[in-house]
Image (cartoon, rainbow, N blue to C red):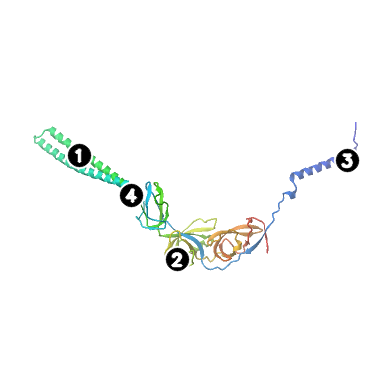
Amino acid sequence: MFRLSAPSLLIAGIALAGLSGCGGKAQMSSASGSPSSNYSSTQPVAVRVFQVAPSVVRGDLMIPAALSIEGVALITAQRDGAVVQLGVQEGSRVSKGEVVARLSGDDDLRAQLRQAELEVKRLQVEQQQLEALAKLNGNEFEREKLLAKQGLSSQREVEHAQFRFEAAKLELEKSRVASQSAQSKTDGVKIELKKTTVSAPISGLVTHRYVEMGSSVAKNDKLFEISPLSPLQVKFQLPQADRATLGPGSLVGVSQVDGDKIVASARVRRIQPVADAASNTYGYVADVIGGQGLTPGLAVTVRVPRSQSSPNALVPRSAFPDGSNLRRGTATTLFIVEGDRSAVRTVWVNTIDGDQVEVVSGLNAGDRVILLPPPQLKAGDLLLVKD
């Protein structure tokens, strides 16, 4: 038998242990992978910033809005037909009861109405005849009863007279029922004939016309929309920071969008109880007072007295991302620096003067706004702020 000496066994054991250790390390390395292979280093985005400082800006908050009105009347077709007369266009002013259109079918209905009215007249004449006959038979019945008491007439003659009287009364009642039925038919034809005439239910302005001359319509189809001319109201949004400046009963100015002259006032009637989270604003409804030539749908600018505590700031136009729809009185977004990362901030734009944009909500003194933000920049990106 072949035997290994003790020194040989010791050397073999050490060699096996070394090989086993190398195999374990190789297995762990292949399972976990190289640390450098899984590490993806995000390169910081180099940006320049503008530090917000409080600014002294005078004037009112300029908020775009549109005039509207409550109580708009929608006129629908009351019967099937075609439009054979059209008397108004969109933008026309109408008075209550004024005829704005006519539908086909009135010729047939007028013929039916004449026939129904003739039937009513015939039945009325018949009813008069039956009334006279019933009165005559009633008199004969009374005479026969008197003669029977005197012994000059038999009971049979009295019964015959009574029968004729009762029959005359029944014929008279039948005629009355027929006359009422004919009159009801006449009223029904009049109602249908009235449905062919489309009249304005209120005085106001025709804001929509849904039909053209010759259009075929079905019952309940839309024909016109009429808006009253008063009372006008204006709805607008106000930043949360300026909410304390207005309350129910407060007055604001109203000017046209192409001018700074105040053409009317508006008194706040209602404030929405819940803020709009997207724009950080509250909704207001105000009733317009005065003003000449103002109509529903007209674009206007609401002028709200500026709050003394409003955090106003002038920001360069270059701070707004490309494609931003910069309009006064609207909400938009900016990128700011928070720590070493980017963040998105919703701001309220009040006015735009050349390269300067007045922001009245969403920024605080000391905020660092990113200038010329790269198109690929997003919230949470690592930043490298350049001096």
Closer to the eye: label 3 or 2: 2
Judge whether 121 appears above or below 100 on screen: above
Image quadrant assignment for residue 26:
top right
Q: Quadrant of residue 339?
A: bottom right
Asked if marks 1 and 3 touch (Cβ < 8 Å), the reply is no
Residue 163 as seen in the image, left or right of residue 45: left
Which label lies toward us, 1 or 4?
Answer: 4
- Residue at 19% x, 37% y: name it: 167
Residue 363, quarter of the rendered image:
bottom right
Q: Kindly identify which residue carries mark 4.
A: 194
For marks 1 and 3, the one nearer the N-term is 3
Q: CA distance from mark 2 to mark 4?
A: 43 Å
Tag 4 secondary structure: helix
Disc 2, disc 1: CB below 8 Å?
Answer: no
Quarter placement of the C terminus:
bottom right
Residue at image mark 1: 169
How dense is the environment of label 3, judged by Cα within 10 Å: few (below 14), some, or many (20 and up)? few
Task: Name the residue that disc number 3 marks.
Answer: 11
Label 1, label 4: how far apart the Cα atoms are: 37 Å
Residue marked by disc 2: 263
Tag 4: residue type? Lys
Picture coordinates of residue 338 (x, y %)? 64, 59
